[in-house]
Amino acid sequence: MNQSFASQLEAGLAAELAALENFVDLTIQERQVLRRDDPVALDQIVRGKARQLADISLIEAQQRERLEQWQPVGAPEGGLRHVSDWLPFLDEQASARVGGLRDAMLRHLERVREINHGNRALIEDALQRNTALHDFIARLVANPPTYSAPGLPPALASQSAHLVDLSG
């Protein structure tokens, strides 16, 4: 296996790992902002996550191009699509480093999945609270409370409610 290829593969994976670490940090910050109920900070975090995802996508696309350019002797005709497919074609040390980078990336992806699951629960809870508040206010506006003297028949009570001016 070409040593230059192994170095480029490692460098690409290291760049992707660094981007994933940043994404994990942003996801943790998102959790904190959701707990503080700070929409301005949340917007900034979400924008940062979108930029980070774009960076990760670019790194992955560059990595895919690299992987497609090198076809080691003995590789299957369909090509080697995954990093783990390449490990047997690298020397022992490079294989260990690349495998370690891949494992670290998988751990970060699992961490992001877990945090995002929790963030989703916080968002759903906030949405339910906001919906309940909205419904409560809508009912108050649609059916404002009125005064009614106790013990009056319903027909008389509805007439008397409009006779009392509570405005001031």
Image (cartoon, grey):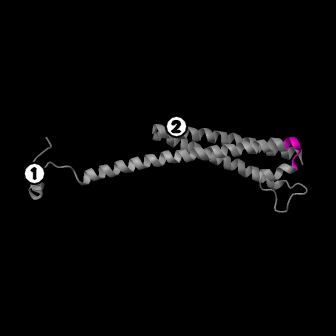
Please name the amino acid that badge 2 sits on.
Answer: Gln
Residue visible at 64% across and 39% down?
22
- Residue 53 percent location from the top left of the image: 63, 47
How packed mark 2 is, by other alpha carbons closer than 10 Å (few <14, some 14-19, many 20 or more), is some
Magenta-tinted stretch: 89-94
Residue visible at 66% across and 39% down?
21
- Residue 124 percent location from the top left of the image: 47, 49
The label nearer to you, 1 versus 2, is 1
- Residue 140 percent location from the top left of the image: 26, 50
In the image, is residue 92 part of the stretch drawn in magenta? yes
Residue visible at 81% across and 41% down?
97
Please name the predominant secondary structure of the magenta segment in the image: helix
Circle 1: element type: loop
Circle 2: element type: helix
Which quadrant of the rendered structure holds the C terminus? Answer: top left
Circles 1 and 2: CB distance less than 8 Å? no
Decide: is 65 above or below 46.
Answer: below
In the picture, the disc for residue 32 is: 2
In the image, is residue 116 part of the stretch drawn in magenta? no
The front one of 49 and 157 is: 157
Residue visible at 78% across and 50% down?
83
- Residue 154 percent location from the top left of the image: 12, 57
Determine which residue is flagged by label 1.
Answer: 151
Mark 1 or mark 2, earlier in chain: 2
Residue 134 shows up from this direction = yes
Q: Is residue 54 left or right of residue 42?
A: right
Q: Is residue 68 left or right of residue 151?
A: right
Please name the amino acid that badge 1 sits on.
Answer: Gly
